[in-house]
Image (cartoon, rainbow, N blue to C red):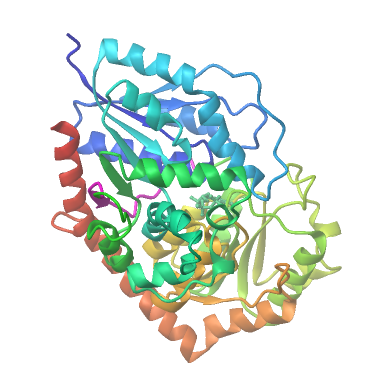
């Protein structure tokens, strides 16, 4: 009989999913060093993985030897990206499905050598739920997005059924369930609303399976998302059955040294930040995948220049050459770098975001509202300007601006365009106005609440202890 207790993690390979999942593994090990943590990673084939996941895995291997990685072999028969409106999400759900046979084999092998206590999966890896159920392995979901995204997934099956009877829209249902401000349907993620897409079907199934899981772990904390977490734990999201226990154990943010692909500007950037006054720099960064057209980049430059504020801006080439190093002289307005050299720093491709957001010189963050970025800003107490690009980011922004009041919103046009004038206005508002001061105060308070939640006796700490007790039972 195998004797070592093992927990298997199954992350989605995107940067914003893999890192928090491994952080969860590290946290479990910190409290229970006798566990073995095995991370199963599927081969991403030609799917664009934003930052170098392979380098990250190497770094974890070197620093956390108790975490081992099990790589599934490549699979064949991957269809070309679908023509639906959510091709990336579609592929992210589909690849785990294509890997189910290999996963089954991997779980069986692991069970032969260890006492497999739990299988923790990303919600994009929902296809694995059935595999684990067939093998009678207790399965938990780890939501690397907000608790509100979990509410959405859990109540979607009910909404789906009742829609035929022309019931309320999903937007109003969310208000009823959570008591949060209305999130207009146009701000909800497309995979929850675009019924014609395959991604919608995957999302629907994930909501059904989550309600049958042993537990739901969410990278959030009570003070940040009290209403959403309460709605789930009160059982309000699953109409026709019970809800598994929910654990708000966040904010779990990257604690390792490896912060993404190497960037020769790293030291220069940190030295530059060291020489700036406290809370004076606006940081602009749009996640691991955010890209802009050449016209939009020029407009951002105009806005920053006219704002008169100090800035640190991460610039990538517009698609399709986004992997190539950007030529700033060609991309940015003529003379921009020279005119702003005393108060601006442009970083190519990738910034050490965690390090930047915890630096004292940073006083504002223009963000795409990806959940990890939101959590990192919260932990740094940095007030935000929300400029969402895709996925559930528009929904996150509504909550950040209207409920939490830790962010201001840019006004973008219907096709996502933001003028230089608009960006200038918002940046000035955040850095100079009374309203900006209020947002800053709220952000500092949320930083303190996050730290408290993670300390012994804090809500996230308590939820984590309850989770581990359940994993061990
Ligand atoms: N990130 C970074 N440097 C960059 C861009 C992104 O370190 O230049 C990190 C960021 O700190 C965060 C993650 O990548 O941990 C992005 O996750 P998020 O959920 O915010 O957005 P996504 O990339 O999933 O859209």
Whether residue 452 is situated above or below residue 211 in the rendered picture = below
Identify the residue at horizontal 56%, vertical 85% (top origin): 429
Identify the residue at horizontal 39%, vertical 56% (top origin): 155
Does any portion of residue 31 appear in the rendered image?
yes
Outermost residue toward the bottom in this view: 434
Query: Does the segment drawn in magenta span residue 421?
Result: no
Identify the residue at horizontal 52%, vertical 58% (top origin): 392
For the record, the magenta segment spans 243-259
Q: Position of residue 173 (x, y in %)?
A: 41, 68
Would you say 58 lies left or right of 301 here? left
Q: Position of residue 326 (x, y in %)?
A: 77, 50
- In this rendered view, identify the residue nearer to me: 113 or 155: 155
Q: Position of residue 257 (x, y in %)?
A: 43, 41
- In this rendered view, identify the residue nearer to me: 456 or 209: 209
- In this rendered view, identify the residue nearer to me: 21 or 216: 216
Q: State which quadrant residue 61 falls in.
A: top left
Identify the residue at horizontal 39%, vertical 50% (top origin): 253
Query: Does the segment drawn in magenta span residue 256?
Result: yes
- In this rendered view, identify the residue nearer to me: 205 or 277: 205
Q: Position of residue 333 (x, y in %)?
A: 83, 68
């Amino acid at each position: 009989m195998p004797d070592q207790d093992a927990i298997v993690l199954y992350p989605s390979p995107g940067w914003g999913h893999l890192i928090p999942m491994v952080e969860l593994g590290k946290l479990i090990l910190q409290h229970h060093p006798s566990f073995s943590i095995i991370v199963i990673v599927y081969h991403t084939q030609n799917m664009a993985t934003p930052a170098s996941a392979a380098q990250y895995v190497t770094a974890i291997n070197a620093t956390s030897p108790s975490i081992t990685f099990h790589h599934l072999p490549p699979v064949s028969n991957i269809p070309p990206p679908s023509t639906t409106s959510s091709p990336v999400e579609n592929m992210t759900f589909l690849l785990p499905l294509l890997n189910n046979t290999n996963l089954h084999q991997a779980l069986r092998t692991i069970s032969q050598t260890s006492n497999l206590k739990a299988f923790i999966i990303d919600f994009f890896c929902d296809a694995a739920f059935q595999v684990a159920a067939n093998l009678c392995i207790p399965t938990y979901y780890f939501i690397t997005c907000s608790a509100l995204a979990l509410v959405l997934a859990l109540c979607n099956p009910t909404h789906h059924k009742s829609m035929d009877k022309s019931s309320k829209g999903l937007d109003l249902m969310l208000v009823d369930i959570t008591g949060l401000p209305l999130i207009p349907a146009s701000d909800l993620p497309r995979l929850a609303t675009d019924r014609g897409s395959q991604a919608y079907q995957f999302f629907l199934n994930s909501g059904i399976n989550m309600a049958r899981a042993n537990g739901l772990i969410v990278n959030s904390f009570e003070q940040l998302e009290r209403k959403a977490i309460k709605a789930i734990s009160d059982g309000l999201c699953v109409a026709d059955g019970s809800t598994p226990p929910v654990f708000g154990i966040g904010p779990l943010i990257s604690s390792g040294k490896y912060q993404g692909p190497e960037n020769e500007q790293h030291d220069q950037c940190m030295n530059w930040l060291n020489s700036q006054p406290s809370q004076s720099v606006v940081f602009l960064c749009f996640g691991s995948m955010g890209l802009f057209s050449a016209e939009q980049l020029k407009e951002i430059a105009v806005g920053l220049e006219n704002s008169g504020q100090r800035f640190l801006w991460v610039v990538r080439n517009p698609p399709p050459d986004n992997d190539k190093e950007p030529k700033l002289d060609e991309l940015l307005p003529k003379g921009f770098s020279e005119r702003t050299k005393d108060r601006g720093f442009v970083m190519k491709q990738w910034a050490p975001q965690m390090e930047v957001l915890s630096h004292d010189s940073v006083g504002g963050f223009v963000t795409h509202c990806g959940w990890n970025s939101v959590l990192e800003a919260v932990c740094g107490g940095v007030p935000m300007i929300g400029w969402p690009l895709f996925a559930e980011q528009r929904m996150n922004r509504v909550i950040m601006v209207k409920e939490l009041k830790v962010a201001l919103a840019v006004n973008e046009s219907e096709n996502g365009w933001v003028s230089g004038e608009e960006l200038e206005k918002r940046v000035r508002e955040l850095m100079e106005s009374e309203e900006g001061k209020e947002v800053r105060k709220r952000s500092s308070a949320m930083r303190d609440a996050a730290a408290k939640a993670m300390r012994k006796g804090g809500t996230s700490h308590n939820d984590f202890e309850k989770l581990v007790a359940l994993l061990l039972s």
